[in-house]
Amino acid sequence: ETGVTQSPTHLIKTRGQQVTLRCSSQSGHNTVSWYQQALGQGPQFIFQYYREEENGRGNFPPRFSGLQFPNYSSELNVNALELDDSALYLCASSPGLAGGPETQYFGPGTRLLVL
Amino acid sequence: RKEVEQDPGPFNVPEGATVAFNCTYSNSASQSFFWYRQDCRKEPKLLMSVYSSGNEDGRFTAQLNRASQYISLLIRDSKLSDSATYLCVVQNSGYSTLTFGKGTMLLVSP
């Protein structure tokens, strides 16, 4: 088991609502990346936070936003939810920007269903 | 064209069979390559890294062909516990973000 935790584990929302997902990174890790995994797809990179600053963003609209806190935990916020936002949301923490997967640990994910 | 492409399968094989998965990537500047395993409703986990010289870990062998921009994974003597989705992953130079393929589902039956 990694030290990365995510909450909540499951969530049901309706279209138009807003949601906040949380990720606690592994101790000693200052970088958090968020991914969206729709059913039958691989994880897609949303954005990455490094030392409280956004460090890169995938092809997601501005209604996907995030934060990283001084303790390096992170939040993903999604506004104006759409049905296609239904997915498993994964966060991964790593000890820096240039590390490989050997040092990048995924959390168990939050499963979001939008009705 | 997607950056990382895989045959989604499923691949149905009996126990003891040998099965191979291929994956192609479009960015010739990609530096690092990996295979992940994902069990149903779980997070992906690193299975192995892929090197140009090829690498082996027990029953698993990974190969990289930079000229053709493809990556392969060979599983020998399949076990029931190998049933999972196998994700091909590419990492570009200097960044920790990962680009995943859609995954290939493997079902090993008794």
Image (cartoon, coloured by chain):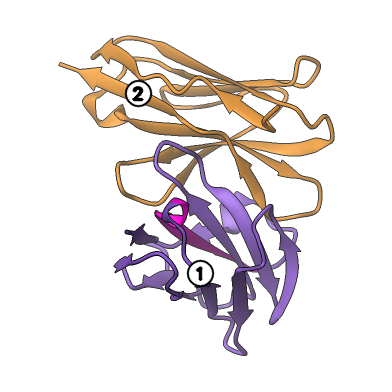
User: Where does the image place residue A50, in percent across and percent down from the top left?
Assistant: 70, 74
Label 2 element class:
strand
Residue corresponding to mark 2 = B106
User: Where does the image place residue B96, in percent across and percent down from the top left?
Assistant: 69, 55
Taking the image as shown, residue A56 lies to the left or right of residue A95, namely: right
* Chain B visual colour: orange
Label 1 element class:
loop
Chain with colour purple in the figure = A
Q: Residue at x 45, y 75 (%)?
A: A18
In this view, the residue farthest toward the right is B29
- Disc 2 from disc 1: Cα separation: 36 Å
Q: Mark 1 belongs to which subunit? A: A
> Is residue B89 found inside the magenta-colored segment of the image?
no
- Part of the protein shown in magenta: A84-95
Q: Residue at x 84, y 35 (%)?
A: B29
Q: Mark 2 belongs to which subunit? A: B
Q: Residue at x 81, y 47 (%)?
A: B93
Q: Residue at x 69, y 33 (%)?
A: B3
